Image (cartoon, helix red, strand yellow):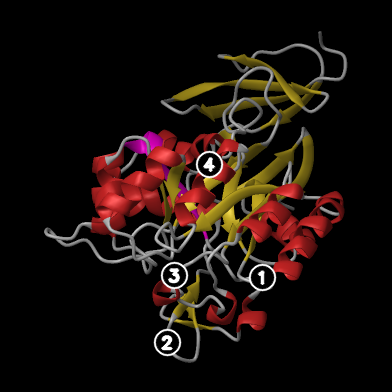
């Protein structure tokens, strides 16, 4: 049993529901044992006493060239991510799908799990910082072309269901096993409910890029808060969402239906022409263009002003995003048989080690 095993010994293991002192064994890129003891025999030992051992963090919404994102985000505990792509021409989006496998192979840190297309089927009224010139309703020809190249590459699509053909798009993509999220939308609560019934079970950057909640016009926010089939992604940087709004989200959804994401453009802000203003990136017009957040900072913020426990915060950044894109059987929690994507950090949320597929891809010197 000890041949080829590496033990992370003496740390506090973070599970989706609690903290437990123990050790984690990995071999051939998989978790092979979780033991409630620091006493182990055989194999290589990595002493992580006084630190937390958590499942690697998964970011469903981060911008930038995948190779660069992979290397940089591993330093802050992210072990897997989706490469965010905004609105482009139909040919440009097909090109992105054709390129992603080569880009994935170049990642030496966090694993790129595929694409998150944020557009082009969005409402121009809620475009935000996205390129409105490329926003358009879906056509059957374009949907066919995207789906023809989507298998294993396109993992998440954000769209506005009120666009002509929007509900049909939800249905077609959901049936193909592609996660569908509602965002950059002016949809009513009733229309959002129709989209949820067709398979759109996510909301992109909750409270942002959608009509504000009103007691006579609750919109997508109302549907997201009250429908248990919906999980809501949140940018928890203290700018995109006020702490009170985040606490409301958690009260309504529970820790199991909130997903922390970054929507970070810190590796990509030059292309946007955006500058840091007031803690986030903004265009010259003042429009928010994305965050400077890391996933570990999001976890820290969830604990600090979200009033959630550390296991709950980590779950929001690991198991919940894994489940959103159908990866929960492979990653997202520390369980025997799952991929050994792990992060080790201290009580100040400083990362000392990140492992991807059992390999140390970052170690604090």
At 66% across and 73% down in the image, what residue appears?
Answer: 268
Whether 266 is among the magenta residues is no
Instruction: Quarter of the image for the N terminus: give it.
Output: top right
Which element type, helix, strand or loop, lies under badge 2? loop
- Residue behind mark 1: 267
Quarter-of-image position of residue 54: top right
Please identify, in this view, whether the residue under mark 4 or under mark 3 is nearer the observer.
3
Query: Gap in Å between the C-alphas at discs 3 and 2?
Result: 20 Å
- Residue behind mark 2: 286
| Residue 189 at x, y percent in the picture | 26, 53
Crowd band around label 2 with a 10 angstrom C-alpha radius: few (<14), some (14–19), many (20+): few
Position of residue 296 relative to residue 8, above or below, is below
- Is disc 1 in contact with disc 2, using a CB cutoff of under 8 Å? no
Q: Nearer the viewer, residue 237 or 76?
A: 237
- Residue behind mark 4: 321
| Residue 213 at x, y percent in the picture | 22, 61
Whether residue 119 sits left or right of residue 223 in the image: it is right
At 43% across and 34% down in the image, what residue appears?
Answer: 311
- Is disc 3 in contact with disc 2, using a CB cutoff of under 8 Å? no
Please identify, in this view, whether the residue under mark 3 or under mark 2 is nearer the observer.
3
Whether residue 135 sits left or right of residue 127 in the image: it is right
Q: Going from the N terminus, do you reach mark 1 or mark 4 first?
A: 1
Q: Going from the N terminus, do you reach mark 3 or mark 2 first?
A: 3
- Residue behind mark 3: 123
**Stretch in magenta:** 254-262
Please identify, in this view, whether the residue under mark 3 or under mark 1 is nearer the observer.
3
């Amino acid at each position: 049993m000890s041949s080829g095993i590496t033990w992370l010994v003496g740390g506090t293991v973070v599970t989706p529901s609690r903290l437990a002192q123990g050790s984690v064994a990995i071999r051939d890129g998989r978790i092979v044992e979780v033991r409630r003891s620091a006493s182990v025999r055989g194999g290589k030992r990595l002493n992580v006493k006084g630190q937390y051992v958590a499942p690697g963090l998964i970011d469903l919404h981060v911008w930038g060239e995948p190779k660069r994102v992979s290397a940089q985000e591993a330093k802050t505990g992210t072990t897997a991510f989706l490469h965010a792509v905004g609105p482009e021409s139909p040919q440009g989006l097909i090109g992105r799908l054709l390129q992603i496998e080569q880009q994935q192979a170049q990642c030496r840190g966090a694993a790129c799990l595929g694409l998150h297309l944020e557009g082009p089927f969005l409402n121009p009224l809620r475009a935000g910082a996205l390129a409105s010139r490329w926003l358009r309703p879906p056509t059957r020809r374009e949907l066919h072309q995207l789906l023809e190249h989507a298998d294993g590459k396109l993992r998440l699509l954000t769209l506005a269901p009120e666009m002509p053909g929007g509900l049909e798009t939800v249905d077609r993509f959901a049936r193909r096993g592609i996660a569908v999220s509602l965002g950059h939308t002016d949809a009513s609560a009733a229309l959002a409910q129709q989209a949820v019934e067709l398979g759109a079970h996510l909301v992109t950057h909750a409270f942002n890029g959608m009509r504000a909640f009103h007691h006579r016009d609750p919109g997508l926010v109302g549907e997201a808060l009250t429908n248990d089939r919906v999980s809501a992604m949140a940018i928890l940087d203290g700018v995109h969402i006020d702490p009170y709004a985040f606490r409301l989200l958690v009260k309504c959804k529970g820790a199991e239906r909130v997903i922390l994401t970054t929507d970070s453009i810190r590796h990509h802000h030059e292309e946007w022409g955006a500058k840091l203003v007031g803690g986030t990136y903004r265009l010259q017009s003042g429009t928010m263009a994305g965050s400077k957040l890391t996933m570990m900072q999001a976890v820290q913020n969830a604990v600090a002003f979200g009033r959630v426990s550390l296991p709950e915060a980590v779950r929001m950044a690991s198991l919940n995003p894994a489940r959103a894109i159908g990866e929960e059987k492979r990653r997202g929690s520390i369980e025997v048989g799952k991929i050994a994507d792990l992060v080790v950090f201290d009580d100040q949320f400083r990362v000392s080690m990140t492992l991807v597929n059992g390999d140390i891809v970052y170690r604090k010197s």
